[in-house]
Amino acid sequence: MRQAIIHLKQADPVLREIIERVGPYRMQHTEPDFETVARSIVFQQLSGSSARAIFGRLKEALGSDARMAPESILSLPLADARDAGLSQQKANYLRDLAKKTQTGVIDFARLPRFSDQQVIEHLTVVKGVGVWTAQMFLMFALRRPDVLATGDLGVRSAIRKAYRLRSLPAPARVEKLGAKWRPYRSVACWYLWRSHDTVLVS
C-alpha cells in the first residue's frame, strides 16, 4: 500500500493534499459472497441508518447468525421480508439474486479469477444490480486496486470540491481525471470518499 500512496501523491498534487489531510488508508473489506451483494441491494437509495436497521431485521427474520444464503432468502415468506422493511421491488431483487446463485448463473467461487469487466458482466445479470454495485463488490469484496467508480455521487462531489469545478463532473471527465491514478484508482476513490468525512467533521 505504501507504493500506492507514493504513486498517487506524485501523480496528483490535489490528491496528495487529500491524502495528507485524511491520513492512513483504512479501507474496510467485506466477504466476496452472496450476502455482500444482498446487502448492497438492501442499502440502495436508503440512508445508512435506515438500511442497517432493515438489513438487521432481515437477518433476524432468517433466524441465523451465519452468512446469508440463497436458500434462506428463497424460503423466507414475502410477508416476512416486507415486515423487515423491504420494498416489494427489493424483495424481488433479492429473490432473483438467490435464484440465479442457486442455479449457478451467479457463481461467487469463480469471481476471484475473473477480470474486472467479467465480474461486472457476471453480476449485472441480476435484477437490481447495476455497474455501481458491481464496482463496489470489486473494490470492497474482491479488493481490486484499480477500480474507478465514475458514476459515484460521492466521488464526483469530492472531485468537484477538490478541483474547484463549477458543477459535478460527468463520468467521462472523472475517467479522464483518474487516468493519472492508475493502477491504484480504488485507493484514490477511498481517499475522495474520506475527504467528505473530514470536511463534515471539521
Image: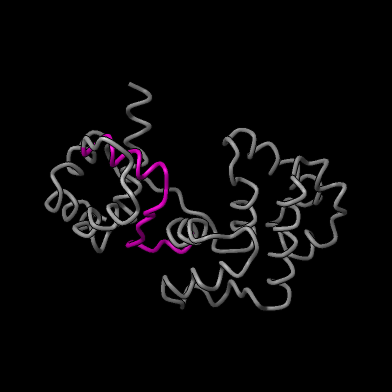
Residue 159 coordinates in the image, percent (x, y):
28, 42
Examine the image and state in which quarter residue 186 appears. bottom left
Residue 2 coordinates in the image, percent (x, y):
22, 54
Which range of residues does the magenta coloring cover?
141-163
Q: Closer to the camera, 101 or 132?
A: 132
Q: Is residue 35 magenta?
A: no
Quarter of the N terminus within the rendering: bottom left
The answer to whether 146 appears left or right of 105 in the picture is: left
Q: Closer to the camera, 78 or 151?
A: 151
Q: How many marks?
A: 0
Quarter of the C terminus within the rendering: top left
The answer to whether 83 appears left or right of 93 in the picture is: right
Q: Closer to the camera, 11 or 1?
A: 11
Indicate how the structure is coloured in the image: one colour
Q: Residue at x 78, y 44 (%)?
A: 60
Q: Residue at x 85, y 61 (%)?
A: 75
Q: Residue at x 46, y 78 (%)?
A: 113
Residue 144 coordinates in the image, percent (x, y):
39, 64
> In the image as oriented, which residue stretches furthest toward the top?
202
Examine the image and state in which quarter residue 32 appears. bottom right
Residue 156 coordinates in the image, percent (x, y):
35, 44
The answer to whether 177 appears left or right of 77 in the picture is: left
Q: Is residue 162 magenta?
A: yes
Above or below — where is 21 with respect to 25? Answer: above
Q: Residue at x 25, y 55 (%)?
A: 178
